[in-house]
Image (tube, rainbow, N blue to C red):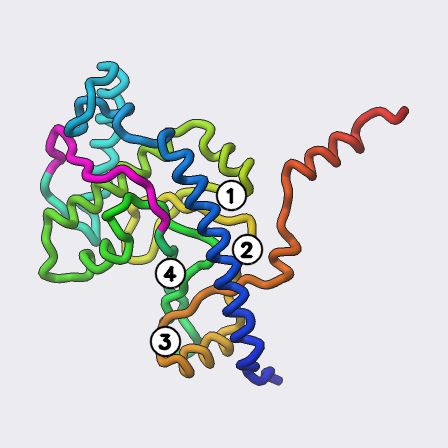
């Protein structure tokens, strides 16, 4: 038998999720700002970037060749279909990292699609290159090719810098957050950098989602963070210490 939709309980869950998500995002953004110098493109690309100082020849040439290969691999594919080549020096307008909502599609029984937002995971992009605007440009049949080109270049540049930053993942893991790379709905095979919090968020039943979207009149939904998920948070350092103590010879 299907449980009735408890509006009051759902509202409490939504409020709790928003409070926890805001705290987690603020902490993740603070860590990202502090560690941003480790992933700046200027030291990697040197003179291949407009306005950047000259770098070490072989190293900067190596990074540019890798980036050009990465761009050629993705730019011509759907949904971008870009035909123009990279211009040197590269014009990276803004290299300050920022967190944007991670969204994906969820199909309900009957075929209706809901756009879901995660309150515990965020896509890393550069300021001035909002992910929602990137999505709008892709969907616009009258889009500007140059604007689309700038978006693809900047998100690939961020992916290159983050994926080449040795030790960055371990640093974030020590801070209880994790960094990974994945593809997102609407962007084909383009790789994105995603930061995940130590607290898991989940989708409730399709029936709850259906009731919520019908009441709100919206085709969007946010995953929920439960108290159980908060209580289940893992402390890797604590677990390592306990394991070490248990494995030590007894007196």
- Using the image, determine if residue 210 lies above or below residue 70: below
- Viewer-side label of 2, 3: 2
Marks 2/4: CA distance?
16 Å
**Tag shown at residue 104:** 4
Q: Which residue is mark 2?
A: 200
The local secondary structure at tag 4 comes to strand
**Tag shown at residue 112:** 3
Marks 2/1: CA distance?
11 Å
The answer to whether mark 3 and mark 4 are in CB contact below 8 A is: no
Instruction: Tell which circle, 2 or 4, labels the residue nearer the N-terminal end.
Output: 4
Q: Residue furthest right?
A: 251
Instruction: Tell which circle, 2 or 1, labels the residue nearer the N-terminal end.
Output: 1
Q: Residue furthest top?
A: 57
Q: Which residue is mark 1?
A: 177
Residue at 50%, 54% in the rendered image: 23
Provide residue 115's location: percent of width, then percent of height: 36, 67
- Quarter where residue 118 is shown: bottom left
Q: Residues within 10 Å of mark 1 (few under 14, many from 20)?
A: many
Residue 44 covered by magenta stretch: no
Q: Residues in magenta?
A: 85-99
Residue at 35%, 76% in the rendered image: 218
- Quarter where residue 126 is shown: top left
Marks 2/3: CA distance?
25 Å
Provide residue 122's location: percent of width, then percent of height: 41, 51
- Using the image, determine if residue 49 lies above or below residue 13: above
């Amino acid at each position: 038998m299907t449980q009735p939709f408890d509006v009051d309980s759902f509202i409490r869950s939504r409020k709790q999720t928003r409070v926890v998500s805001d705290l987690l995002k603020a902490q993740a953004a603070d860590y990202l700002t502090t560690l941003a110098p480790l992933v700046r493109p200027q030291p990697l690309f040197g003179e291949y970037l407009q306005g950047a100082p000259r770098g070490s020849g072989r190293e900067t040439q190596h990074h540019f060749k890798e980036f050009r290969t990465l761009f050629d691999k993705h730019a011509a594919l759907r949904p971008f279909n870009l035909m123009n080549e990279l211009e040197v020096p590269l014009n990276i307008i803004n290299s300050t990292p920022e967190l944007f909502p991670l969204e994906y599609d969820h199909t309900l029984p009957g075929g209706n699609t809901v756009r879901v937002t995660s309150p515990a995971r965020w896509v890393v992009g550069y300021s001035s290159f909002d992910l929602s605007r990137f999505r709008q440009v892709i969907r616009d049949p009258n889009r500007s090719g140059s604007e689309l080109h700038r978006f693809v270049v900047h998100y690939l540049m961020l992916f290159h810098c983050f994926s080449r930053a040795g030790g960055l993942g371990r640093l974030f893991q020590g801070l209880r957050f994790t960094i990974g790379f994945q593809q997102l709905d609407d962007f084909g095979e383009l790789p994105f950098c995603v930061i995940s919090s130590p607290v898991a968020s989940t989708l409730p039943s399709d029936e709850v989602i259906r009731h919520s979207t019908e009441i709100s009149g919206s085709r969007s939904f946010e995953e929920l963070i439960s108290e159980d998920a908060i209580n289940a948070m893992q402390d890797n350092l604590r677990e390592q210490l306990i394991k070490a103590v248990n494995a030590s010879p007894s007196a």
